[in-house]
Image: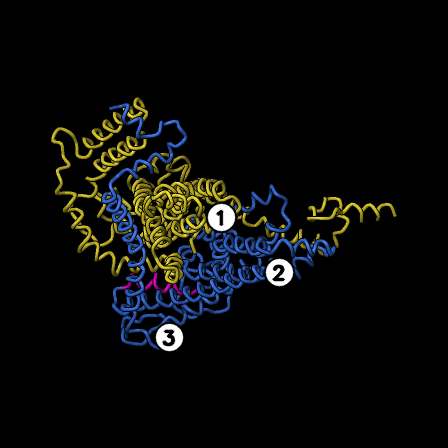
Amino acid sequence: MAAVSSLRFPAPHSGLSRFDDGLDRAQRSPLIRRMRSGIFWGLCGLALLAIIVPLLDMVWTLISQAAPLLNLNLFTHGSAIDPAHLSAPIGVEDGILGSLLLGLGVLIVAGIIGVLAGLYIVEFAPPRPRAVMRFCSEVLSGVPSIVIGLVGYTVLVNGPLQWHYSLLAAVISLSVITIPYIIKNTEVAFDQAPRSLREGALALGISRFTTIRKVLLPTALPGIVGGLILAQAIAMGETAPLLFTANWTDANPVLKLTNNPEPYLTGVTYNTLILPYAQAHELAAAAALVTVGIILVLLLLGRAATARSKRMTERMDL
Amino acid sequence: MILLRRRAVGTPPGPAPAPTAARRERDTPIGDAVTQALTGVFGSVPTALLVFILVIMAVTAVPAILFSGTGFFGTYFSPGNYYLAPTVHNGIAAPHTAAFGFLPEMLGTLVTSAIALALAVPISVGGVLMLTEWVPRWAQGGVGLLLELLAGVPSVVFGLWGVLTFGPFMLSTVSPALTGIIGGFPWVFPWLPQGMAWALLGVAIAAFIIIRASVHGQRRRRFRRLALVFLFISLWGAVAPWFTGEVNTAGGVLTASLVLALMVVPIIAATTRELVRHVPVLAKEGSLALGMTKHETARVVTLPYISTGVLATSLLGWGRAIGETIAMFFIIGNIFTGIPVNIYHSGATLSSLIAGTLDAVLQAKTDVSALFAAGLFLLVISLLSNFGGRLIIRRVAGDQALPVGRGV
């Protein structure tokens, strides 16, 4: 019997050992192969459903829970809930304004740092430091957001700087989270610029600064903008780093950098979901729905930017 | 003159060489130097931030580490009584009878993330295979957008969904069914504690099979697979008792783990999709030409090709799962004082402990420091998994830009 089986299967060290499984399979009856195939793809289909169905259910939960609040009051009223007047109109005006303010702050702080850092890493850095910087930036994106909140609290809010709960502390915490993504996108954007352009500029004797500004930047711009949009989407959805830096309020934001708690959209959900009123739960769902809607719009914008950057580089690559 | 000439002649025709250091220096106008210096400062920001975060976390955690020592592995957390005389230990004062046992939270963190990964990896790989092989091209973009949206959904929304919809569904349907099925099965050997019997039996059988297989040499893959099956059964036997017993809350460890799995899926799926896209077409077509079915091609060509990358992105997903805070805070139930009796009970993770407690203990420096110690533990684990994952992914993908990180 042993001799027969060694005839049917390649020897274990024949170099085919990786594929003997496949040969083995080919000798099964077609019915069994079809059945196995059906089971495999059935499970894969279930897996795909397991990804999509909860997401759709989540969106449906938000819409159905928030339904009573979905009118213009949502955008013109604050999120303060008065237990004595539960039927008074409530909305997420403060959250939207606060989140926009935070997004603007992130655009300025993380945008400047991230784009310039990405530019240095991809254009100027010598190979060894470049590898280190890239690695650190990527690892930074893996730091848990609650840890960034803790550090923000102990350094900015209640530490040497004593800013207390404030817009500035929140913006800086969010920036730390988003900088790695901006850097990554900036790098990719500059990397995508066709080699021929770079070499052409070099051959003309143009300085590197001018090359970057006049030759590379136009091609890289859509990619960089895509990174900035992605950063906005991430900043829009974060809660953990803001708990101990912005600390939420249900009043409209004021333009004060320090010593003033800051409202934000996810904070409305976080703080009203635990209140014991039906209206509060509706408000939480409404705020979440608005957040998800804004993030969806940002993702679509980001896609458009990426597509544009791809088209541009393809057109220019001769 | 000679210099000029040498420069003109010295530039060879054909592809431009990288400018030598000397030449770059001579040609550099002032703007270049300024740009380089300026961007260089910003370029070192991420590295500096990473070091800064590590140092701050470590320094702030020192008092609690001195105070508690190995007490971190106790099962009882209490911020202590602020109105009585402080307890002093190792020269560090903490509120009266404060205790910083983080074992339940550590276990909660590890268990939820382990269950989440065990579910998320096969779901993302299977889902991506289905997406790339069977979903028509015009629909792929839409499903891809759904994946991106899932990655972009804020964790507080996952929390809200868990509280309002998914938790009650688990309580009414899934958990009772699970505990009924698993509890109804005869897992118990009367002479051994529950689970242990299966663990021992499975390990013994697996060892026997592996030894036999190494003696025989032939059909090793099959033997190995059989051994894996038995190992799996035995591990399940050891784990199964945690899945039996009463269900009394909509939240709890299992609900939190499932939601966590859903949050990790887009991270793994995004990278897997990119990896599947890079599988060499020739190998796939060759396999099909040999008469293998699509399923066999996927198993023999695609899966081995992407396996290392999937391992790497799973490590990254693990890092993300460990640090997940807000959804866990809403769903897991936040019991800080003991290990849950089964998987359906309320528990806690390190991150939910921090989010749920920091507000209340801000007056007491040592309590805050203890929470920083918990954060330090989180930080170290997630940094290690990130290091590992990114090293592997660099080896697999080279300089290609794989969407590693958030999956957005």
Q: Is residue B185 left or right of residue B158?
A: left
Q: Chain of mark 2?
A: A
Q: Does the stretch in magenta take in A262?
A: yes
Q: Which amino acid, mark 3?
A: His
- Which residue has dot 1 on it? A140
The answer to whether A44 is drawn above or below residue A271 in the figure is above
Q: Residue at x 84, y 47 (%)?
A: B5
Q: Quadrant of the N terminus of chain A?
A: top left
Report crowding for label 1: few under 14, some 14 to 19, many 20 or more residues within 10 A (C-alpha): many
Q: Quadrant of the C terminus of chain A?
A: bottom right
Residue A106: tell me if it is visible.
Answer: no
Residue B170 position in % (x across, y down): 21, 54
Q: Is residue A139 left or right of residue B159?
A: right
- Farthest-out residue, bottom: A72
Q: Quadrant of residue A69?
A: bottom left
Q: Quadrant of residue A290?
A: bottom left
In what element is the residue under mark 2? helix
- Report the chain shown in yellow: B
In what element is the residue under mark 1? helix
Query: How many angstroms separate mark 2 from mark 1 (CA)?
Result: 26 Å
- Which residue has dot 2 on it? A217
Q: Which amino acid, mark 1?
A: Leu
Query: How many angstroms separate mark 3 from mark 2 (CA)?
Result: 42 Å
Which stretch appears magenta?
A: A261-275
Q: Are marks 1 and 3 in contact (CB under 8 Å)?
A: no
Residue B250: tell me if it is visible.
Answer: yes
Q: Which amino acid, mark 2?
A: Leu
Q: Chain of mark 1?
A: A
Q: Going from the N terminus, do you reach mark 2 or mark 1 first?
A: 1
Chain A, hue in figure: blue
- Farthest-out residue, right: B1
